[in-house]
Image (tube, rainbow, N blue to C red):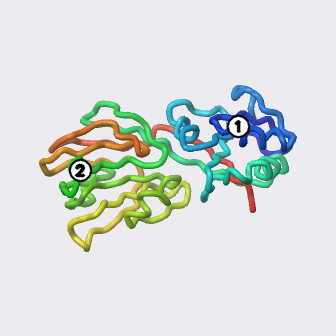
Amino acid sequence: MWDGGRVDVAFRGEAESVERAIRDAGVDVVAEADADVVVAAGDAAIHSLVETPADAPVLPVTPAGGRYAVPKSNVESAVASLAAGDYWHTTHPVLSVTVDGDHAGHALVDVTLMTSAPARISEYAVSAADRAVAAFRADGVVVATPFGSDSYAAAAGGAVLDAGTGLSVVPVAPFSTQTDVWVLDPDVDLSVEREGDVSVYLDGDRRREVGEGAAVGVDRASTVEFLTPDG
């Protein structure tokens, strides 16, 4: 594990300005196999980590930044902070998703079930650790990692989670105003309890459509380590 000092950086993404900023910081850009840190610039590069894991800790870069991501405009100073040892580590789960026992893909941000037809609701059940948690009628349900908990799940009323604290499970537009939200440890199981087509989304990407009785499993498959500069 690299822990500060001279740093060799690999770049993953399509933002030439970000790669240029890394070089302007006086840092060598190398192949990922030789890197101490991988800079993943943009959503596509960050999401690629689920299918093509990095062999080194990752510095995520987005246009506006975030709790764990660096703003695109601050890349040069962020890389300098890494070289000076001014950063902190967080570890986030990569989720493996199954539908009726068949592998459907991986997610780093969130897993969402949503009724396919506009203005329609379905009924969903949530269980964890082989116990029933809840059943509710809603437009959908989202399961977010801590990395993604400040995005769609938060907009739906869920908690914003620190790394390592579990998964945020939130009904989307529930029929009842009394519906709870939950923080659960992986593994989480979702099921569609009411007729009507429901779409399964992984990190915002629609993967497939399911119907009544479908069982969706959300398990921790692996982890990704992020570095966030101090300050």
The answer to which image quadrant residue 177 occupies is bottom left
**Which residue was labeled with disc 2?**
115
Count all numbered tags in the image, as a single digit: 2
Farthest residue to the left: give it.
195
Rendered position, 176 above or below 188 = below
Name the amino acid type tagged 1: Glu
Q: In this view, does 208 lie above or below 84?
A: above
Q: Which of 198 and 123 is in front in this view?
A: 198
Which residue is at a point 59% across and 43% down the rendered structure image?
42
- Image location of residue 47, percent across then percent down: 52, 40
Image point 44% across, 63% down: which residue?
154
Residue that mark 1 sits on:
16
State how far apart marks 2 and 1 are (Cα). 39 Å
Which residue is drawn at the image coordinates 57% and 41% (left, top)?
Answer: 46
Tell me the mark number nearer the camera, choosing from 2 and 1.
1
Quadrant of the snapshot with the N terminus: top right
> Percent from the top left, x then y, of residue 50?
51, 36
In which quadrant will I find the C terminus?
A: bottom right
Q: How crowded is mark 1: few (under 14 residues within 10 Å), some or many (20 or more)?
A: few
What residue is drawn where x is 30% and y is 60%?
Answer: 171
